[in-house]
Amino acid sequence: MRLMFALFATLVATPVVADTPSSFYSAKKILSREVYQSDDRVTFYCGCRFDEQPIPGKPERTRLAPDAASCGLLPRKNANRAARIEWEHVMPAWEFGHQLQCWQQGGRKACRKDPVFKKMEADLYNLVPAVGELNGDRSNFRFGMIPGEPRLYGRCDFEVDFQGRVAEPPPHVRGDVARTYFYMADRYGVRLSRKQLQLFRAWAAEDPVDAVEQRRARRIQAIQGHANPFVE
């Protein structure tokens, strides 16, 4: 009886060790089912409500799709991609991947075999729901400030300078972007330039942590087992 009690006590006292999802594919499923729930189903940049919708021409299948009317979204060029939700890496896979040896041996495809890259690619803290066209247009461009206000997506305050390869997020998520970059640099040793650090420090100060960002971080911490210290 004492042995059984001691074993039970050990099991209760031993915490469950969580970790990053095993792949980018599994991360997308977890985000959709466990992190972005009900009222939190809002796209990162444009603030569009999104939910499961039948795929045109395939009513038996569904996909996550934005409600364009909820945010004044207009496609810039690719209406099909603007009609679906994609999971975007705030820090692009190129930005953290090209600092690894595997990237020099074959880019993202080669890095998919690297356990460190797989953890980074699937880290939930670095993934947000975005309108597909914005995800495609942003590509692997770095974040920065763009002169003027060239609105390409209706009322969505997301700007892209294709020639300069720069994307500018709306003010209400600039702090979120900064804290995500700080997290990736801290956890995985990703190097940031002095210019990036200066910009992100300013953004973090101008857009402090809010309740929505905290709630998302708590859900991810429960899944991955560690916090984003720049949020908590």
Image (tube, rainbow, N blue to C red):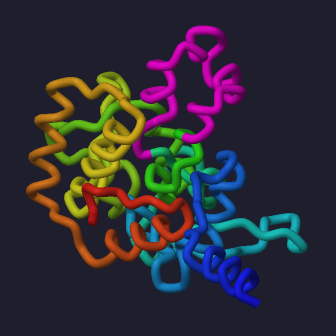
Q: How many marks?
A: 0
Task: Give the percent coordinates (x, y) of residue 107.
Answer: 61, 18
Task: Give the percent coordinates (x, y) of residue 126.
Answer: 45, 49
Q: State which region is magenta.
A: 90-119
Closest to the observer, 67 or 26: 26
- Asked whether residue 174 is drawn in magenta, I would say no
Is 79 drawn above or below residue 109 in the view shown?
Answer: below
Q: Residue at x 30, y 23 (%)?
A: 164
**Relative horizontal placement of residue 143, taking residue 32 as reference (left or right):** left
Quarter of the figure with residue 70: bottom left
Task: Give the percent coordinates (x, y) of residue 133.
Answer: 53, 48
**Relative horizontal placement of residue 35, taking residue 186 as reference (left or right):** right
Quarter of the figure with residue 35: bottom right
Closest to the observer, 51 or 202: 202
Task: Give the percent coordinates (x, y) of residue 34.
Answer: 60, 74
Q: Residue at x 31, y 32 (%)?
A: 166
Closest to the observer, 70 or 196: 196
Is 193 drawn above or below residue 64 in the view shown?
Answer: above
Q: Residue at x 23, y 63 (%)?
A: 172
Is 102 drawn above or below residue 42 in the view shown?
Answer: above
Looking at the image, the residue that sits furthest to the bottom is 1
